[in-house]
Image: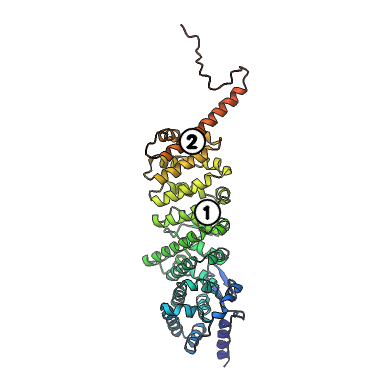
């Protein structure tokens, strides 16, 4: 009877939105310091936001309530729980059921509880996460699912799960929910989601040589745990699932980075920026283009320019490497990012002094086959020429002045020719100003420059 009362009370706590969640043993991924997510109880991401959906919430019918009790009862036979999780997965797979199930007390929170509980099996977590993904597909469910009790904790736990398929499904769920702007703001300020997502995109193909803030470790947490259990290296399908999970996270970050109102906070979310910089240039071309496009969106807010140059180590270096990429989209996004940063006066001298930046931009200005990339490169050179301190950097860069002089005779693109002429005029202005300043310091009285006078030394006539 005590066990029956215990199960009944647990079910009531999950289904009743007005009561606090039970003190469950929701300790996930405690093997690693960085991925430790501790939740003494399932919490609301924002209980006030959820109240607007209360009128549409329904009580589960008898058969569904029995199914939810089976899922929530940790003492139930494992086979029964797996089957119950599979039944919920099947129910949510039907499009006509998704809106109703998302608005049924205990469905989302029950699925979240299974994912969070330390005694859940990998198959149970996968089926429940798949069910949550099904519920996240309809547009009308995007907010109510995200605001449901325990969902964000389950999402963060799923993204750092030991099983790659669970990670992949959780990341796809996150990507789906970022389509709603209200969710983006909340996700960016949720430390569990930010930490889990940043950790996921930190996955690299070389799984055994990475080092993080907590010291050396053997690659991805999933791989390390498997190796510690003497199971061996991950299979090709598991690595593919981890890469798909990373791509989903990068797509989610790309969507979030397009939101102007949170761009300031996005650029200053250190785990995200560090992860983007670390993985840039290490992935497949298509995936790397998504990463560079996210970094490009960060530079669209003028207030972010100084921060990414001086407070985000290697941010600009990553863009320089991307400029030289043979993948067109990646190169173009990097050029646009550098163009935005070069518009900030305090950043121009620092940009010009970064190794290989002027060389890479000059090559694109002269040799690129795309008019857009050539124009963007020329605008970078023009912006940098606005700072007189960059006169030396630009004149010392091999081919920079020669490229500018060649483009002043560009016939096919008048805009490109105009920008090249404008850049030459800026450089000439600084040379003229330097010469005039030097002439003013002399006592010859010949201060009109240039004076066109030819001076010889003891020439015979």
Instruction: Say which mark, if any, is on residue 356.
Output: none
Q: Secondary structure at mark 1?
A: helix
Residue 88: give x, y in percent of width and height.
45, 81
Which quadrant of the structure image shows residue 240? bottom left
Q: Residue at the far top: name it.
A: 461
Q: Residue at the far bottom: name it.
A: 1
Q: Quadrant of the N terminus?
A: bottom right
Which residue is at a point 58% across and 56% down the rendered structure image? 264
Residue 25: give x, y in percent of width and height.
57, 77
Which residue is at a point 59% across and 24% down the rendered structure image? 438
Residue bearing the label numbered 2: 422
Query: Is residue 314 shown above or below 440?
Result: below
Which residue is at a point 58% across and 18% down the rendered structure image? 446
Q: Earlier in the sequence, mark 1 or mark 2?
A: 1
- How packed is label 1: few (under 14 Cα within 10 Å), some, or many (20 or more)? many
Foreground residue among 288 and 123: 288
Foreground residue among 166 and 15: 15
- How packed is label 2: few (under 14 Cα within 10 Å), some, or many (20 or more)? some
- Name the image colouring: rainbow
Q: Is residue 277 visible?
A: no
Foreground residue among 256 and 230: 256
Foreground residue among 61 and 451: 451
Query: Is residue 214 shown above or below 441?
Result: below
Which residue is at a point 49% across and 83% down the rendered structure image? 71
Residue bearing the label numbered 1: 298
Say which of marks 1 and 2 sits in front. 2
Q: Secondary structure at mark 2?
A: helix
Q: CA distance from mark 1 to mark 2?
A: 28 Å
């Amino acid at each position: 009877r005590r066990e029956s009362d215990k199960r009944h009370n647990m079910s009531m706590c999950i289904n009743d939105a007005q009561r606090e969640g039970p003190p469950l043993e929701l300790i996930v991924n405690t093997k690693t310091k960085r991925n430790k997510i501790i939740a003494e109880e399932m919490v609301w991401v924002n209980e006030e936001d959820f109240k607007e959906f209360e009128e549409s919430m329904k009580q589960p019918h008898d058969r569904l309530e029995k199914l939810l009790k089976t899922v929530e009862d940790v003492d139930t036979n494992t086979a029964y729980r797996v089957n119950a999780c599979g039944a919920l997965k099947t129910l949510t797979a039907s499009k006509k059921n998704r809106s109703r199930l998302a608005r049924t007390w205990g469905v989302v929170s029950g699925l979240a509880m299974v994912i969070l509980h330390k005694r859940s099996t990998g198959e149970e977590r996968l089926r429940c996460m798949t069910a949550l993904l099904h519920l996240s597909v309809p547009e009308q469910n995007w907010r109510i699912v995200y605001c449901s009790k325990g969902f964000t904790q389950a999402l963060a736990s799923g993204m750092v799960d030991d099983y790659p398929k669970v990670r992949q499904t959780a990341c796809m769920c996150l990507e789906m929910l970022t389509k709603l702007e209200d969710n983006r703001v909340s996700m960016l300020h949720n430390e569990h989601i930010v930490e889990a997502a940043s950790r996921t995109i930190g996955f690299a193909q070389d799984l055994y040589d990475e080092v993080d803030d907590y010291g050396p470790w053997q690659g991805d947490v999933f791989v390390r745990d498997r190796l510690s259990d003497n199971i061996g290296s991950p299979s090709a399908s598991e690595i593919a699932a981890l890469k798909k999970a990373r791509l989903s996270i990068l797509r989610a970050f790309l969507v979030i980075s397009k939101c102007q109102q949170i761009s300031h906070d996005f650029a200053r979310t250190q785990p995200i920026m560090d992860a983007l910089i670390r993985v840039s240039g290490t992935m497949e071309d298509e995936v790397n283009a998504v990463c560079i496009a996210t970094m490009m969106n960060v530079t669209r807010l003028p207030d972010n320019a100084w921060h990414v140059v001086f407070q985000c180590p290697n941010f600009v270096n990553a863009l320089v490497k991307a400029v030289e990429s043979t993948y067109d989209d990646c190169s173009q996004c990097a050029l646009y990012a550098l163009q935005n940063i070069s518009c900030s006066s305090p950043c121009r001298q620092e940009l010009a002094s970064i190794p290989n930046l002027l060389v890479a931009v000059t090559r694109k200005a002269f040799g690129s086959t795309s008019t857009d990339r050539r124009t963007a490169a020329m605008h970078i050179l023009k912006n940098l020429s606005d700072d007189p301190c960059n006169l030396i950097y630009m004149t010392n860069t091999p081919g920079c002045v020669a490229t500018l002089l060649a483009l002043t005779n560009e016939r096919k693109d008048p805009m490109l020719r105009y920008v090249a002429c404008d850049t030459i005029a800026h450089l000439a202005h600084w040379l003229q100003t330097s010469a005039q300043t030097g002439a003013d310091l002399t006592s010859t009285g010949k201060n009109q420059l240039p004076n066109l006078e030819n001076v010889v030394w003891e020439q015979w006539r």
